[in-house]
Image: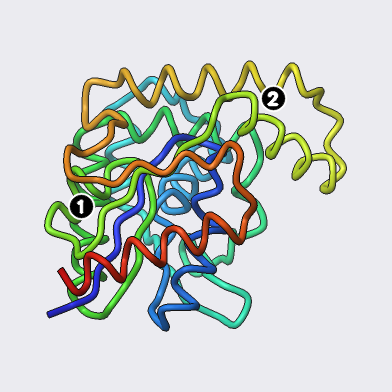
Amino acid sequence: MRLNVAIDGPVGAGKSSVADAVAARLGILHLDTGAMYRALGLTALRRGMDLQDEAAIVALCRGLEISVTHEKDGQHTFVEKEDVTGLIRTPEVSMAASTVSRYAQVRQAMVALQQRLAAETDMLLDGRDICTTVLPHATAKIYLTASPEVRARRRFLEMQAKGSDETYEQVLAEVIRRDEQDMNRAVEPLRRAEDAVLVDSSGMSFEEVVETLLRIVEERRHA
């Protein structure tokens, strides 16, 4: 039986970095599913498309080749064989990803790809609907969150390190707006699955979060 670990949670909860560390400790691959939606959002922005035009975005998704590879430095995301890994972490792309992910046919296409990848190998997936939709029968299901203020502070520091001039207040407003959009979309909104273990990392160090998740996985693995 495959070891599949599913992690959901809101923007800025630290899912990607924590998932990288947990997957490495477990010796399995980590698939950052959010990067796939970001790649689609980036492409739509580059092409000057109206993100509210659902039919156009669905058509783009169906005709776009999005793929991932796992390298020594983590997951690399490609669009039409172009490595866009370094281009998909801006606030603009983040909001675009949240917008395009609302569309049912976009999510169907992405979920099918994610499920196929997870069926092929032991894997940890993180995103917004992994526990609820992509891997409802995962070995371990976790909902990782933190307060909006803590999540905004983390993102603010990350963006500062990259030279961004956005203020903390702007980042906090964006986090709150993104939460509102993700949790209230009509198709597969962000929510905690009933059998997902809640982990609030607000007062925890990075290593404490990693150790907590590893303990949960081991408990579920041997249940």
The disc at residue 126 is: none
* Element under disc 2: helix
Residue located at (54% from left, 68% from top): 21
Residue hosting label 2: 171
* Image height of 168 relative to 82, above or below: above
Residue located at (41% from left, 45% from top): 37
Q: Position of residue 198 (x, y in %)?
A: 35, 41
Label 1 to label 2, Cα distance in Å?
Answer: 29 Å
Q: Position of residue 26 (x, y in %)?
A: 41, 78
Q: Position of residue 39 (x, y in %)?
A: 48, 50
Q: Residues within 10 Å of mark 2 (few under 14, many from 20)?
A: many
On screen, residue 9 versus residue 12, left or right, reads: left
User: Looking at the image, which is closer to me, 213 or 2?
Assistant: 213
Residue hosting label 1: 134
Q: Which image quarter: residue 218?
A: bottom left
On screen, residue 147 versus residue 164, left or right, reads: left
Q: Amino acid at mark 1?
A: Val
Q: How many dots with numbers?
A: 2
User: Looking at the image, which is closer to me, 21 or 49?
Assistant: 21
User: Looking at the image, which is closer to me, 209 or 119?
Assistant: 209
Residue located at (87% from left, 43% from top): 163
Q: Amino acid at mark 2?
A: Val
* Image height of 62 relative to 44, above or below: below
Say which quadrant the C terminus sits in: bottom left
* Image height of 27 relative to 58, above or below: below
* Element under disc 1: helix
Which color scheme is applied? Answer: rainbow
Q: Which image quarter: residue 28?
A: bottom left
On screen, residue 150 versus residue 218, left or right, reads: right
User: Looking at the image, which is closer to me, 88 or 161?
Assistant: 161
Q: Position of residue 220 (x, y in %)?
A: 22, 65
Residue located at (64% from left, 24% from top): 149
